[in-house]
Image (cartoon, rainbow, N blue to C red):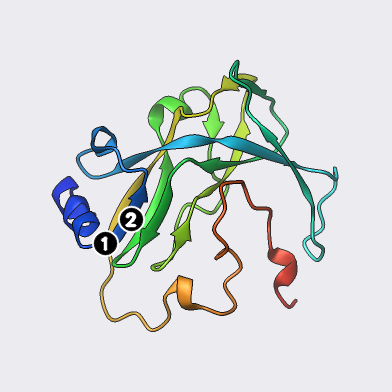
Amino acid sequence: MIFSDKKILESIETKKIVIEPFRRDCLGTNSYDVHLGKWLAMYKDQVLDARKHNEIEHFEIPETGFVLHPGILYLGVTEEYTETHNAVPFLEGKSSVGRLGIDIHATAGKGDVGFCNTWTLEISCTQPVRVYTGMPIGQLIYFAVEGEIERYYNLKTDAKYNTRTVKPVESMMWKNKF
């Protein structure tokens, strides 16, 4: 079951959902719009290795915007810091963004109950497109959870993305044992 606008507001009032900054005009019928933060990042190496720590280079989006190019994976970040303690948050791209040929996530559209952070975006595009800080980039949809939660994400000692940040975070796959 997807949360309605009233259920999202109720969850915000009871601190089961936290959105900072919260803007009432970003609340849709059953979603909340999030915006592109000022930081982007790119991997330093051309070839990435799943077993090693692939370093990234951060840079700020200038006021004039930044042109994304096809064939490059950019890491972006939402302006909004979120916490979700009673639902499963899903991040989807806005249709207007998709119609510009921009994908905001390759596989990581679902958050865990207890996720408390900004969202790192895995941005790619089909043709060159200029993006700007603060532009609507996606929407959060909240799904009800059935049953008790045993381990909230923010309480897991082995969680890889618990450190609060305003910048995109690179893959931590290298921390897995395989």
Amino acid type, mark 2: Val
The quadrant of the picture occupied by the N terminus is bottom left
| Label 2 packing within 10 angstroms: few (<14), some (14-19), many (20+) | many
The quadrant of the picture occupied by the C terminus is bottom right
Rendered image quadrant of residue 152? bottom left
Mark number, residue 30: none
Q: Which residue is mark 1?
A: 15
Question: For the point 64% across and 37% down, which residue is it?
Answer: 40
Residue 1 visible to the viewer: no
Closer-to-camera residue (57/91): 57
Q: Under tag 1, what secondary structure?
A: loop
Question: For the point 40% across and 68% down, which residue is it?
Answer: 114
Residue 28: x and y in percent read 24, 38
Mark number, residue 18: 2
Amino acid type, mark 1: Lys
Q: Under tag 2, what secondary structure?
A: strand
Closer-to-camera residue (5/106): 5
Question: For the point 69% across and 63% down, which residue is it?
Answer: 172
Residue 142: x and y in percent read 30, 55
16 horizontally vs 119: left or right: left
Badge 2 vs badge 1, beta-carbon distance below 8 Å: yes
Residue 156: x and y in percent read 51, 78
Q: Is residue 153 above or below residue 38?
A: below
Residue 157 visible to the viewer: yes
105 horizontally vs 142: left or right: right
Q: Is residue 107 above or below residue 21?
A: below
Q: Is residue 136 above or below residue 141?
A: above
Residue 122: x and y in percent read 60, 44
